[in-house]
Image (spheres, rainbow, N blue to C red):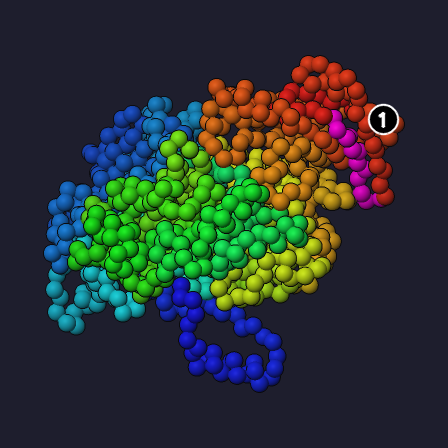
Amino acid sequence: MPKSRPASPRWALLLSFVVLFGCFIIPAVTVEHANFKKCHQSGFCKRNRAYADEVSAQGYSWNSPYELDAASIRFKDGQLQGTVVKTVSANEKVKLPLTISFLESGAARVTVDEEKRLKGDIELRHGSKVRKERYNEVEKWVLVGGLELSKSATLNPETESGLTKVLYGPENKFQAIIRHAPFDVQFQRDGQTHVQFNNKGYLNVEHWRPKVDHPEGDGEKEKEETWWEETFGGNTDSKPRGPESVGLDISFPGYSHVFGIPEHADSMSLKETRGGSGNHEEPYRMYNADVFEYETNSPMTLYGSIPFMQAHRKDSTVGVFWLNSAETWVDIVKTKSYPNPLALGVGAKTTTQTHWFSESGRLDVFVFFGPSPQEISKAYGELTGYSQLPQQFSLGYHQCRWNYVTDEDVREVDRKFDKYKIPYDVIWLDIEYTDGKKYFTWDPLTFPDPRGMQEQLDESERKLVIIIDPHIKVESGYPVVEELKSNGYATKSKDDNIYEGWCWPGSSHWVDCLNPEAAKWWAGLFPYDKFKDTLHNTFIWNDMNEPSVFNGPETTMPKDNVHHDNWEHRDIHNINGIALVNATYNGLLERKKGEIRRPFVLTRSYYAGAQRMSATWTGDNQASWEYLAISLPMVLNNGISGFPFIGADVGGFFGDPSKELLTRWYQAGIWYPFFRGHAHIDTRRREPYLIGDPYTAIIAQAIRLRYQLLPAWYTAFHEASVNGTPVVRPQFYVHPADESGFDIDDQLYLGSTGLLAKPVVSEGATSVDIYIADDEKYFDYFDYTIYQGAGKRHTVPAPLEKIPLLMQGGHIIPRKDRPRRSSGLMKWDPYTLVVALDKNGKADGTIYIDDGETFDYESGAYIHRRFSFQDSTLSSEDVGTKGPKTAKFLKSMEGVRIEKVVIVDPPKEWQEKSSVTVIENGAKAASTSPLEYFAQERGKAPFAILKDPNVGIGNTWSIEF
Ligand code: NOJ
């Protein structure tokens, strides 16, 4: 991602036009397509697509070469083992060991390996010393549980020749039907097939073979063109193991929507990829890369990959997780079938067929059966881990730019936020704070007093995040590079030398965090006594960890580079980023003996599992409305894919946003789980106080709304950390039976609060249309205007100063209403509860609170309460189990009370009431609290305010109205 690039003649021409006509046009910049492979430029992608085309063309006459050898099948303890035989020719058969594991969780896992490679019975080319097996360690980095084999799974006694049937899942209501020849698997729930493997016959395991030198002009030579070597952008990949891709079709009969497989700048409901109107021509690609000036509405790869897909239809969600860390592509095609051919279109059923292929590694796929989106989140989280419960501060606002240029600059920005009364929690330093791009150092001229700077931030409980990238400057005398080299902790090139490439510092080496020793060493660079002049309020940003290599193929590392244990980079590419983050996370856990705190690490590159240790963002977007709009589906999609702690650079990274765009972006950004303003070094300064009123005031209001709702955000993050539910949720997730809402990805719900936001993402808008699925009342958050009517869009006014936000009736929302400079300073502030009643006069909600920074919550140091309102009584009851540290925590929170309760849409009779009865911890409060009722004009719900009920946030109480 170079800072800037020379102007091409085309640009020069355009520029002169702009100057000539004196108009102010900002031309949209877009990705250099030639730098990234299209499918036809990636050998295995082209081969797998061609294979699929050939299979489809042959139709019924196609004979899949894959057959499960019936004699090899063994079923024991919830696992089926056998050998799939691939017939290459009459004389050549390839053995592919198969396992199908039925897990206690109800998920199933299918793996296919290759016997010859597994046994090391192959020859490597070019005298290479890399591993001969298909990569089989990705699970070490990704899976953390959920692998217990089912005790009840059993072979179905009703046998049929040529089929093996296994009953599994809850009450054995799931069934896997395994056909032997050709080999395919159908996964059924309640007698209905929901997921099919190899139904289309695209299963393709490229087996090992020796290279044959074909004569020139021989068709074979051309066919094998990309088998043994591949050149792209002047870089040749040597492929010591020859072709070895794995491909499989996975169909979802009856499902017309598939979501997931981030990261792509695209709609949440994935599009078809085989061309046609509105469809993509290219498959969705997952090959983590630094895509300079990425484009929107595109299946191109981006910085992170989570090969987890969900298919959704009315009342059923199913999922598949493709556990492979090599380059992966996914084609999607939807077909319609008509149960009654005479009534075309009536009862048409859409089936989504997906086709997955990875360049190397094993075939390893999990199938989840839901049937609710929540159950899918839970099962996937059980396997790959739930997202980390973050430090409370990290849910506040983050102020970043490339770069704050001196420590005095940082102090000044800090003071200005206070002057303008804009809360923020974290200020960030990009690469320029270092001494010549040498990480773990400070530039002595521009940052002469980093301690003083951090101390100033600490005075208002604010934090600093500084960037540490994985490329290490080649410079003699720089201790980090010296240690990296002398210990052998760097990634190697194919010829066994330390790999050298180009990044911010110029010539660089890359730490190989796949090496446990290297990872330990890296973690050891973060303690306070090692990373000099960093204090307890400093945290870390890992950028460029795809890894980004400016002079590498597709701006990354050559695939034939070699990592620890002689695995090729090709095999591990997509987990390279999380290996670094894992080491950084460990480094931040205990920076001083005995001081164990939750780390905060932001990563650009990610894979499944990253949610356990980091936050991420959508990378280098642009200051345009289009990028503001696409940020919503991107954030939502990551959330349902198990990694909810994400946001987009508020304001856009490249370019200068107009004042309106910046303002709207803040109003949208407050709904990103990770809320950070960031900008490229060449952009104008745009801290919110600089833009001037009314914009500054409006932005400040938006940020204050984020802070007001922090208790709800923290509760949503807690839910994510125990259930895997997204922090912000798309429409289908909350209303899984409402078909009209399935592809809505521009409005979102905050956790389980019933808060429904629809950010403005277009210029000049004065209203938005919010889709409402059910017939509950939805109340405007600010003035309680009522919107009601299921299955349609409702126009909600949205002049610049207004954030379109509704509350679904039936929820109790916890808030903190006192404006402060940072979230840390709000710690002891009292709470407000907003009770938005439903049609039946009921509501409920939850709150989760802990110290926001340590792991003491694991020993019970937390408050988790359920609030409910029914029969005119609001009550608070305890949720969940506790531990040894509960009592002490509760004591520390004793003084934290509820200062206000707002009831939205109370019954009219309340007009007559002026007080309520409060019972706390079994005893009636000495005095009653005053209640005020506010009738409102037509269209708006009445509300009542109860001031100072003075009940403790951690206590059991009830308030009778
Ligand atoms: C690329 C990152 O995406 C961007 O956010 C950062 O500012 C630059 N690297 C410089 O570190």
Residue 160 inside the magenta-drawn segment:
no
The quadrant of the picture occupied by the N terminus is bottom left
Q: On the picture, is 500 further left or further right than 340?
A: left
Q: Nearer the viewer, residue 481 or 190?
A: 481
What residue appears at the point 43 percent right and 67 percent down from the top-left corner? 3
What residue appears at the point 58 percent right and 75 percent down from the top-left corner? 25
What residue appears at the point 51 percent right and 25 percent down from the top-left corner? 861
Q: On the picture, is 810 further left or further right than 887?
A: right
Does residue 100 sit above or below 868 in this rendering? below
**Residue 434 position in % (x across, y down):** 40, 56
Tell me which amino acid carries mark 1.
Answer: Lys
Q: On the picture, is 540 further left or further right than 741?
A: left
**Residue 813 position in % (x across, y down):** 66, 35
What residue appears at the point 23 percent right and 61 percent down from the top-left corner? 237
- Secondary structure, mark 1, is loop
Residue 140 appearing in the image: yes
Q: Residue furthest top?
A: 922
Q: Nearer the viewer, residue 31 or 278?
A: 31
Q: Residue furthest bottom?
A: 20
Indicate the quadrant where residue 711 lies.
top right
State the extent of the magenta-drawn residues as a range: 938-949
**Residue 23 position in % (x across, y down):** 61, 79
Does residue 52 sit above or below 176 in this rendering? below
Q: Nearer the viewer, residue 737 or 335?
A: 737
**Residue 683 position in % (x across, y down):** 53, 66
The quadrant of the picture occupied by the C terminus is top right
Residue 948 inside the magenta-drawn segment:
yes
Residue 226 appearing in the image: no
Name the residue that disc number 1 marks.
913
